C-alpha cells in the first residue's frame, strides 16, 4: 500500500540536495515544487498552497526562520519542517516557537523525511477537519438557539393572549 500524496515545497539553496529530495518525493507520488531561496519560496506560496514545506535553516538572503515566519503569517495551514546541517537546541526551540511542526538535522535518510512530511500533512489535515467540524457545530448551535428564541416568543405570545381573556 502506498502512502497518500501531498503537495510539497522544498526550499533549499544546495541544488544537488534540493533536486535529490524533489526527485525522491516525486517518485513516491507527491506533488513537488522547489525553490532555491526564501524569496522564490514566498513567490510560489503566493501562487498556490502547499500541504507541507521543507525549508533549509541556513540560506543566503532570507533565513529558513524568516521564511517560516512569513509562511505562517500568510498561510497558517502549510506545515513547515525546518532542515539544518548545524542544529542546536536553541535553533530548534526558535523554529518551534515560530510554528515549525518539526526540525530535522542533516544528513538523514529520505524515507525519514517522507515519514516526517506525512506526519506533518496528517496533522494539517486533522487541524483543518477540526476547524470544519467546529464551524458545523457552531452553525448547528446557532440554529437551535434561533429556534429556541422563536419558540420562546410563541409561548410568550400565547401566555399573553391567555392572560388577556
Image (cartoon, rainbow, N blue to C red):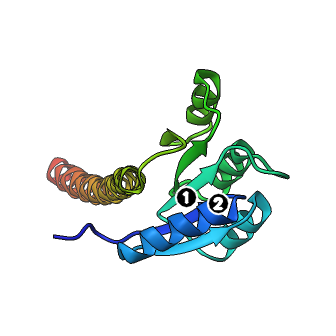
In the foreground, 125 or 31 = 31
Horizontally, is 46 left or right of 146 in the view?
A: right
Name which of mark 2 and mark 1 comes first in the sequence: 2
- The residue shown at (46%, 46%) is 108
Looking at the rendered structure, the secondary structure element under dot 1 is strand
What percent of the width, then of the height, locates residue 162?
14, 52
User: Quick one: 105 or 136, which is closer to the camera?
Assistant: 105
x then y, percent, for residue 106: 55, 43
Rendered residue at 32%/53% (across/down): 126
Choose between 75 and 16: the one closer to the eye: 16
Horizontal side of 138 relative to 32 (left or right) equals left
Give me the C-alpha separation between circle 2 and circle 1: 7 Å
- Say what secondary structure mark 2 lies in: strand
Callout 2–callout 1 Cβ contact below 8 Å: yes
Q: Residues within 10 Å of mark 2 (few under 14, many from 20)?
A: many
- Return the mark for residue 11: 2
Residue drawn at x 65%, y 55% as measured from the top left: 71
Residue named by callout 1? 53
Q: Position of residue 3 (x, y in %)?
A: 26, 66
Amino acid at each position: 500500500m502506498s502512502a497518500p500524496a501531498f503537495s510539497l515545497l522544498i526550499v533549499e539553496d544546495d541544488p544537488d540536495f534540493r533536486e535529490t529530495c524533489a526527485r525522491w518525493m516525486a517518485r513516491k507520488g507527491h506533488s513537488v515544487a522547489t525553490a532555491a531561496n526564501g524569496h522564490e519560496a514566498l513567490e510560489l506560496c503566493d501562487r498556490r498552497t502547499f500541504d507541507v514545506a521543507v525549508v533549509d535553516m541556513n540560506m543566503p538572503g532570507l533565513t529558513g526562520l524568516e521564511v517560516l515566519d512569513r509562511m505562517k503569517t500568510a498561510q497558517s495551514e502549510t506545515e513547515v519542517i525546518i532542515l539544518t546541517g548545524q542544529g542546536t537546541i536553541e535553533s530548534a526551540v526558535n523554529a518551534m516557537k515560530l510554528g515549525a511542526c518539526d526540525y530535522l538535522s542533516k544528513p538523514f535518510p529520505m524515507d525519514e523525511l517522507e515519514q516526517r512530511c506525512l506526519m506533518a500533512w496528517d496533522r494539517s489535515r486533522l487541524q483543518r477537519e477540526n476547524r470544519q467540524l467546529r464551524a458545523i457545530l457552531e452553525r448547528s448551535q446557532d440554529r437551535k438557539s434561533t429556534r429556541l428564541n422563536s419558540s420562546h416568543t410563541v409561548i410568550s405570545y400565547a401566555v399573553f393572549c391567555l392572560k388577556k381573556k
